[in-house]
Image (cartoon, coloured by chain):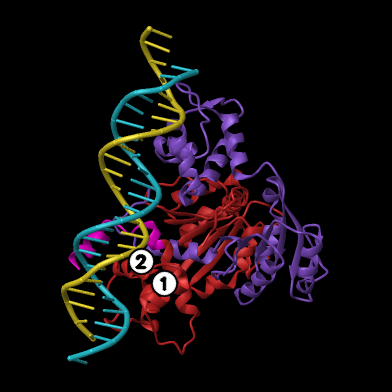
Chain colours: A purple, B red, C cyan, D yellow
Amino acid sequence: MTIRKQRRKEGIPRGVISRLPKYYRYLSGLSQAQEKISSAELGKALNMTAAQIRSDLSYFGSFGLHGYGYRVDELKNHISAILGLDREYSLVLIGAGNLGRAIASYPNFRKRGFIIKAIFDADPEVIGTELAGLTIRSIDTLEDYLQANPCDIAVITTPKEASQAVCDRICRAGIKAIWNFSPLDLRVPNDVILEHTHLTDSLLQLSFQITNNETEKSS
Amino acid sequence: MTIRKQRRKEGIPRGVISRLPKYYRYLSGLSQAQEKISSAELGKALNMTAAQIRSDLSYFGSFGLHGYGYRVDELKNHISAILGLDREYSLVLIGAGNLGRAIASYPNFRKRGFIIKAIFDADPEVIGTELAGLTIRSIDTLEDYLQANPCDIAVITTPKEASQAVCDRICRAGIKAIWNFSPLDLRVPNDVILEHTHLTDSLLQLSFQITNNETEKSS
DNA sequence: TAGATTGTTAATCGATTAACAATC
DNA sequence: TAGATTGTTAATCGATTAACAATC
């Protein structure tokens, strides 16, 4: 226990963090009828070793019962709390292009507690129109809005030409977490949390694998 | 050289593959005026060590000049070839919801040689309408289409309830690479390449970091 | 040539896995 | 209690980095 606490102090490895949503997603998809699950079962379903699952979870506590496994409900709740899903987050979305529209309209985010409060764009044609129940605001009013309505997360779906400037502005306005979709590695102050989703990078990884396919197999 | 060849045989590590698009993106963004770049400069720009860049590249060959660095143009072309960007790929997109529409309308994919040839949906309201210059087809015609027009990549943007069934159908129809956006870990035969982009997982990682933020810093 | 920077090896670091005592 | 499975340690594996001979 002491050692694990120490491990935790040193920070949770990226790999562990990236697996938590998968655990959560899988547990959420199980039928209500399934009361228990062992690390071996979970590992089989998610195509990973039982040891890795137990090791990942042990960063956060002891959620299982010796000789039994894990109660599905309990484990799901623990992971939900670890992920920070027991509260709401307010979001601003910047860039009402195709991708911005898709994200604004995606109902699952709201379901998990991520509420888009305002949408901004630079295009006069778009400003003032409706999207996902909100009136799109002018990017010029970004700072005013954020000062009056501090938000937890900014989603950047602008073209890459605009994204660093937008990023600088929202950081100055006090945003502490950014989800960036523009194909540019943004620079942020190091107290700001940054998560990239580079669609083109994923596609290039796919084309790499197609190209370098001979004899290799993915499991 | 022999050893590197051996390394290559053993397969390129995931981490290396995931960094290649970043190298490519950065090099593409440089001004035409910049003729050369050293691993040290590149490392500084991308926030990684020079050794890692040289090590990554050495999986594929020797692209630098001793005592000089890399010619930007040459290196970009090499990486482009490694990524398989020197050819075109034909894509089908399945699921013309918000996300599907965004992807179909995103011009950068086409620019890189990823050409969407057909779009499918299950909704009779949507079938027959236009999207990105294509008429949306009925999902019922998926197999017929793929038989007549073999495609390189299928993009799945259906709701998660439909995605595994769609996945099974396209695998049976001979698709060898899938880009999946539905929030479900698809099962595929192991000669099929699968790339996931789970938007919700990224958002949960962000909320984890917000929640577990104290004293930690991301670089 | 002297200076610079590569490509590659060896050393280090960190993450995964196997094994097992603890225990329900 | 006997059987099962956890949580954790130690062993293994793989990836990153530092160092340096090769060389332009």
Asked whether B15 falls inside the magenta stretch, the response is yes
Query: What separation in Å lies between label 1 and label 2 (alpha carbons)?
Result: 8 Å
Residues A175 and B101: in front is A175
Q: Is residue B24 left or right of residue A167?
A: left
- Chain letter of mark 2 equals B
Can residue B99 be seen here? The reply is yes
Query: Callout 2: few (<14), some (14-19), or many (20+) C-alpha neighbours within 10 Å?
Result: few
Dominant secondary-structure state across the stretch colored magenta: helix
Q: Read off the residue under disc 1.
A: B43
Q: Which mark is residue B52?
A: 2
Against B173, residue B87 (above or below) is below
| Residue at figure coordinates x 40%, y 68% from the top left | B83
Q: Indicate the position of residue A62 as horizontal and vertical percent values.
A: 51, 31
Label 1–label 2 contact, CB within 8 A? yes
Magenta stretch holds residue A133: no
Q: Secondary structure at mark 2?
A: helix
| Residue C12 percent coordinates (x, y) | 31, 56
Q: Badge 1: few (under 14), some or many (20 or more) residues near its Cα, within 10 Å? A: some
Q: Secondary structure at mark 1?
A: helix
Camera-nearest residue between B146 and A51? A51
Question: From the viewer's perspective, is B61 left or right of A155?
Answer: left
Span colored in magenta:
B1-17
For the image shown, how many numbered marks are present on the structure? Answer: 2
Q: Are marks 1 and 2 on the same chain?
A: yes
Residue at image coords 62%, 48%: B211
Q: Nearer the viewer, residue A166 or A218?
A: A166
x%, y% of residue B153? 47, 60
Q: Earlier in the sequence, mark 1 or mark 2?
A: 1
